[in-house]
Amino acid sequence: MQKRKEALEKYEKAKKSGEVDKDIISLLDKLNSTPIFYTTSSCSGRIVLITLPEIGDKRNAFFLGKWHHAVDSGKVWEALKKYKEDYLFMLMQSPVIHIVCKDMESANALIKISLECGFKYTSIKNIKEEGILVEILSTENLHIPLGKNGKLLVKEIDFFVEMANKMLLRSKQKLKCLEEKISYLLLFSS
């Protein structure tokens, strides 16, 4: 019970400070309003420009741009003006939600509807006394190396932005599906 209380307090604080992606709040609120689920972290999906001094060095990564919605290629080009060093990547990352489920029955129900909505990488991540941690994750994902040592090596930026936007919008549709199915699940589980 204490872990749930702490997670919900952290969520409410993050929501008030604007740290929670706006387009996923209603889904998270539904999940957190039930006695069978609570969320521990989430992202509604994003497009980022990121630099890394070494491949895999996430601790020293620097974000040149981060968008949780479709982005205009002009904004991406503007962010690229800040690129001076290291490796440069453009990423499109699918939505991810971590949810603690009360028991195996609720975890199975959540996994089933997540898979029905197209979140094909949904799985149980951990089983502990406080509940079963389910990660909801989709297949949409781009990792494009764009530059090295401050030099842009790729010119097709507009095409990559177009692809990233299409993938992001596709993954956002899956979130809408999930919210509808969660509403239906909660209606019949109470």
Image (cartoon, rainbow, N blue to C red):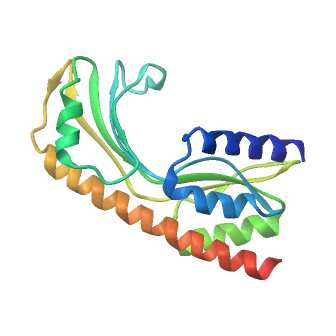
Q: Residue at x 82, y 47 (%)?
A: 4
Give the residue at the far front of this rendering: 16
Location of residue 103 in the rendering, given as x and y in whole percent from the top left corner: 84, 62
Between 84 and 187, the residue placed more toward the observer is 187
Name the quadrant of the C terminus.
Answer: bottom right
Q: Residue at x 19, y 19 (%)?
A: 150
- Image-based side of 137 in relation to 10, left or right: left
- Image-based side of 52 in relation to 31, left or right: left
Location of residue 185 in the rendering, given as x and y in whole percent from the top left corner: 71, 77
Location of residue 83 in the rendering, given as x and y in whole percent from the top left corner: 22, 23
| In the image, residue 76 above or below residue 187 | above
Q: Residue at x 65, y 67 (%)?
A: 111
Between 16 and 72, the residue placed more toward the observer is 16
The image quarter containing residue 29 is bottom right
The image quarter containing residue 149 is top left
Location of residue 100 in the rendering, given as x and y in whole percent from the top left corner: 75, 53
Give the residue at the far left of this rendering: 155
Q: Residue at x 18, y 46 (%)?
A: 73
- Image-based side of 82 in relation to 184, left or right: left
Between 158 and 32, the residue placed more toward the observer is 32
- Count the labels in the image: 0
